[in-house]
Amino acid sequence: MPKTKTLVSAFAAILLMAGTASADELAKYDVVDMAIPTSLTGKAGDAAAGEKVFINRKLGNCLACHQVTALKAQPFHGLIGPTLDGVAERYNEGQLRLQVVNAKAINPDTIMPAFYRTEGLHRVLKKFDGKTMLSAEQVEDVVAYLKTLK
Amino acid sequence: MKFFWRDITLAVATLSVAVGVGASSANAADWGPYQVEDRRSGYTYMTDESRAMQVDTFQNPGMLWVEEGADLWTTVDGKAGKSCSTCHGDAAESMKGIGARYPVVDEGMGKLKNVEQQINSCRGKNMEAAPYKWESKEMLSLTSYVNHQSLGLPVSVKVDGAAAPFFEKGKAFYYERRGQLDMSCSQCHEDNAGNMVRANILSEGQINGFPTYRLKWQKPGSTHRRFRGCNKQVRSTPFGYGSDEYVNLELYVKWRGRGLPVETPAVRN
């Protein structure tokens, strides 16, 4: 968490220096051909850290809905979403990133939450309001982990 | 969903054959009164143990609250010196059907009222007694007792006429995404009923057994407690107990279970 705060502060500082009035702390990204081609943090994620975020029930909690054979040591994989076995062969990095950041940009009706979005939400609990489910760094770590699922 | 149930059915059937047990509740295609058309009570999503616990009156822990409610029914309270039974007599007759047809429109209030609100209205106007707090032992007990008088009767709520606008509001709530997880009731309980979320099976979210004894809670809880829990799980600010939003939702969700039997007190995980 301290790392995240530092990152956010750094970002805010840059925005202030640029004379931007907005308090928007979200990393900016471009969607190109239903994908986000570039890293939210400007660097590659850490797959090992991403696996932890992926499993953690208070962070990614991805196994609530998805199945991953490589994680069969973890009990109870949900059956709401598709298996993620081989997901890296079906989608490129940019597509995986958009899927994690905001799956609704791909399928507006999906049940999958947007892990890096704060706008357009309704009645968010106060302690989560204005916050993303994952930090930009955690998104990149999860994307790096997903890239290992071949 | 279909794959999942078929897998379970096959697995149980295979097991039954293997150990020489005949056909039992393993036949998921026949849920008796607990399924009406495509609507299935939460009962059908539970384990055999939970189902056995519910239908055995002596094992069902929710019956302790029903019994407490029976005592309250005849206990004088308030300045008017009345009990419920002073006006309503034998609950087995006077309360029969209430659990199947509430919430109803209260013309004086100009909106819906549910059983809890009717109890407090009676306590105020007729008994001159203080209202019960929502989720208090007394409120859960009396609500359980009142709804239990409709045990086995098919859910049948009025959703047309004066109830129509409230029904529509409840329906809109059901399909509206909310919270940081940005999910609607329908995405779990309509689109994914029967699917596993991690270790838990999603049911249709039927409310024909409330107050329901939840093993997780170790006590019964109201529909509104359950709604609040669901809302918080998707990281959304819940509405208050007895709020118009939840009473409207209660009518809509109850309608979704039309024809299912009143099961109060149901036993659920």
Image: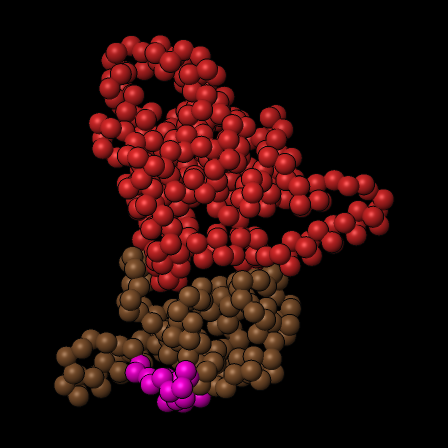
Q: Is residue A25 left or right of residue A4?
A: left
Locate residue B30, reporting x and y percent: 66, 41
Locate residue B220, reporting x and y percent: 47, 35
Q: Look at the image and tell me whether residue A56 can be seen.
A: no
Locate residue B140, reporting x and y percent: 42, 30
Q: Residue at x 57, y 56 (%)?
A: B195
Q: For residue B3, what is the image quadrant?
A: bottom right
Q: For residue A5, what is the image quadrant?
A: bottom left
Q: Residue at x 63, y 40 (%)?
A: B31
**With respect to residue B191, does A14 lie above or below?**
below
Locate residue B154, reporting x and y percent: 51, 31
Q: Is residue B203 magenta?
A: no
**With respect to residue A96, does A121 lie above or below?**
above
Q: Colour of chain B?
A: red
Q: Which residues are magenta?
A: A27-47
Q: Colour of chain A?
A: brown
Q: Main secondary structure of the magenta part?
A: loop
Q: Is residue A21 left or right of residue A82?
A: left
Q: Residue at x 61, y 25 (%)?
A: B58
